[in-house]
Amino acid sequence: MSSKNVDQPATAATTPRRTWSITGRLILHFVASTATLLLLATGFLYWKLRQSLEERDRALLASKVQVLHSLLRDHRENLDLLENEIEHEASESALPYFLRIIDWEEDASILETPGMGDNLAPAAFPDPVRLQPVTPESIKPHLRRQGRHMLLAVIIPAGADPSGHEILQVALDTSQDQELLRQYLHSLLAILGLGLVFTTVAGAWGAHLALKPLAEISSTASHISARQLHERLSASLWPSELAELAAAFNAMLDRLEQSFDRLSDFSSDLAHELRTPINNLRGEAEVTLSRSRDPQEYRLQLASSLEEFERLSRMIDGMLFIARSDSPAKAIERARFDARKEIEAVCEFFEALAAEQEVTVDFTGKAAITGDRLLFRRAVSNLLSNALKHTPSGGSVHLALQRPTPESVLLTVQDSGGGISPEFLPKVFQRFSRGDRNHPIHPGGIGLGLAIVQSIMRLHHGSVEVASEPGKGTTFTLHFPGTP
């Protein structure tokens, strides 16, 4: 029982939540928007037609009232003319209407359209109003099985006698209007239905075309692997939004390909660089163990092995530093310090080595730098050590601090060595890149010094540049963000 209760939350938590696809959402929004517009348009057209018919019917009622009022006022004695208007004209009109004249005092029908009494009794009409422009409030709708009518009752003078009054009742048959509205409504609903069907099909087709580039991106992404990083998206005919996405995707692939290439090269170089000291250690150990030796020989062997261990240790430390500095999350503790004092301390440390090699080291300039003091000293040490290794006896190394602008500080390390060949110059900051200098003096380096300098400058948001001319020396320039 307890096991079942424990498993249920895990199952609920791992159940994937079902979501709408982008195509489905586009179609739904497109259809909903179109349906709303069609409903508003058809509703407005239906309302407008109904208003037009009602206005026409009210105008017709008003005109009939005016005609009957004129006849009763001017041709009261001409019964034939009244009968023709009431009995014949009413029934032959495009919209049938009924007329009735009622004596005010006797409350009796004087004249009415034939058949009017069967369907429209006098009591069905609204209370009579004085003769005036017909308003919607004066008209009463009347719905019966025989049809729909608009009823109006008006008080008019009885002939030329101003004291006498009669009631004129007018009923307009609007059944044709209702049938017209019903057919119009059916047509609008049919148009609405066809419009929604067309919108759904067009929306699905449009969404498919619009999202086709995404399908290509998905297809390309599914084929990407460490060996398939050369594939790129061709977005020349894509919409601008997806073209930007494709450009960003291709740029990402470029960065990944470059990273994998560097990783592959680094792995190959690392394997090659580690193989040499390990083979040296193994060979010396095998030779030492091949026969019995006196303690002095073992001591010499251990001293030789210790040199290889130190080289391996320096190599591992350098690789770890570069790997950590390449991390985007790596940050340094920044503080303002006097760069001249740090450079003087480094020069003092290499003073004995420079004197032994008979190389002159001098330094000029002063500036303050905001950054990591220890990393700054390490970068200067690597450059100065590198310069001393490749400067022949009698040569010189010159270090100079400059502030070309308030926003930058330059440190140059210039030697008078043999320089670097042009084909090797672009590779000097690569890991395990060493040698290939003209007249190399110390070929035993591990090839990480300049790569470490580049990593230090990257951590300081600066840069390092190199300029060299074979036979005339090399100049390294460090660009630091300055402190005014």
Image (tube, rainbow, N blue to C red):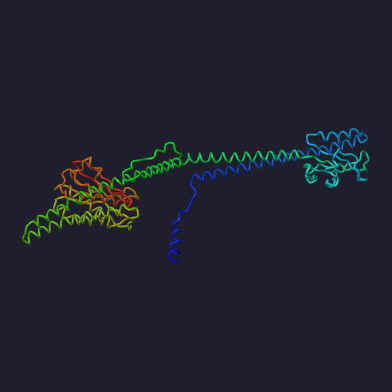
- Is 150 placed left or right of 346 in the picture? right
Residue 27 x/y as whole percent: 53, 43
Q: Position of residue 212 (x, y in %)?
A: 45, 40
Closer to us: 470 or 280 = 280
Q: Position of residue 259 (x, y in %)?
A: 31, 47
Residue drawn at the location 35% of the way across and 55% of the way down: 329
- Quick check: 395 left or right of 467? left
Residue furthest front in the image: 1
- Quick check: 59 left or right of 332? right
Q: Residue at horizontal 66%, vertical 42%?
A: 44
Q: Is residue 284 above or below residue 50?
A: below
Q: How many marks?
A: 0
Could you say which quadrant of the image residue 250 lies in? top left
State the residue in front, 352 or 124.
Answer: 124
Q: Residue at x 85, y 40 (%)?
A: 116
Residue 77, given in percent of the width and then of the height, sits at 93, 35
Quadrant location, the N terminus: bottom left
Q: In the depicted view, which residue is nearer to us: 199 or 391?
A: 199
